[in-house]
Amino acid sequence: MADADTKSAKNYQADVPAPNEPFFLKGSNNLDWGMKNRLANIFDPRSGRTVMLAFDHGYFLGPTSGLERIDLDIVPLIDHADTLMLTRGILRTSIPPTYTGGIVLRASGGPSILKELSDEEIALSIDEAMRLNAAAMAVQVFIGGENETKSVHNMTRLVDLGNRHGVATLAVTAVGKDMARDAQYMRLATRICAELGATYVKTYYVDEGFETVTASCPVPIVIAGGKKLPEPEALELAYNAVQQGAAGVDMGRNIFQSEHPSAMIQAVRKVVHEGFKPAEAYEFFRTLKSERSPG
């Protein structure tokens, strides 16, 4: 039986109001505690941004260049990533369970690069996502594509499941070959995903009007790295995106296909979290590269 004497309980500080600070991430104030906690494993609360390392390409491409050996090519990079975007198979087989950053699981799939990619299905259960301690589930959304409605319904089903269990949903906007990759399309695609419940959205950066894409989307946007670029151009892409409202980057090929992936991901971090300008970040990349090169 605990001591019933409460005389020592006297320091109530009644003159100090309880804190009621808004959550640091755009559009997330009304989410549950568990969802916010998972989002804080994706986005760094100090900067409000994220460097996601994407290497889920094998779910439709197989062992593409730079991903031949996840254990040798990717695992040495993971401590520099805020978040990993990957498949459950790679998570189980190749990623050390000591990794404590956010896990974003690819939750849609079906066709390979040999087929019509827009014909995807949900390929992950919420039980599996919870079992693997996922912070978010990623689903491809093909606005304007042949299977647009099906992909939107995939997303909304994941949103319902994720909200029930406190797991975020990342909507990945896929641009079809007949779609114009411009601000008008990106505004349409990202806004539809947000309106239908996505927790955050991954899309492409565009040179003209990207600030209107981030401004009109009520949830955070991270940008895809896209095809491999020379390192200075990839760093400039990341810089321009975050300066125009992106909450971070989800880069894959521009990191793991770089001539020095470890130096590149650290340079990207300097841009995203510390505001390094592209030239500064590239010089940082070159310094790291020279320090670690043989001879």
Image (tube, helix red, strand yellow):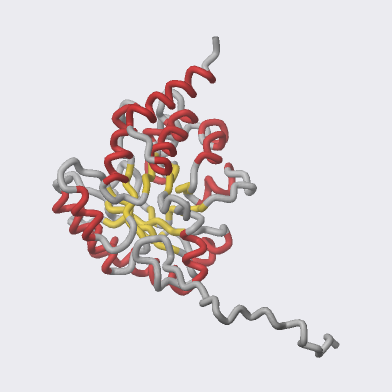
Along the line of sight, the residue nearer the viewer: 100 or 65: 100
Image quadrant where residue 281 sits: top left
With respect to residue 167, does 103 lie above or below?
above
Q: Residue at x 17, y 45 (%)?
A: 181
With respect to residue 216, does 244 lie above or below?
above
Which residue is outermost to the top?
295
Percent position of residue 209, x then y: 16, 48
Percent position of residue 117, x then y: 29, 49
Q: Residue at x 57, y 58 (%)?
A: 132
Q: Residue at x 30, y 67 (%)?
A: 153
Along the line of sight, the residue nearer the viewer: 76 or 51: 51
- Left or right of residue 238, residue 181 in this image: left
Percent position of residue 77, x then y: 52, 36
Image quadrant where residue 95 sits: top right
Residue 176 in view: yes
Q: Residue at x 32, y 54 (%)?
A: 221
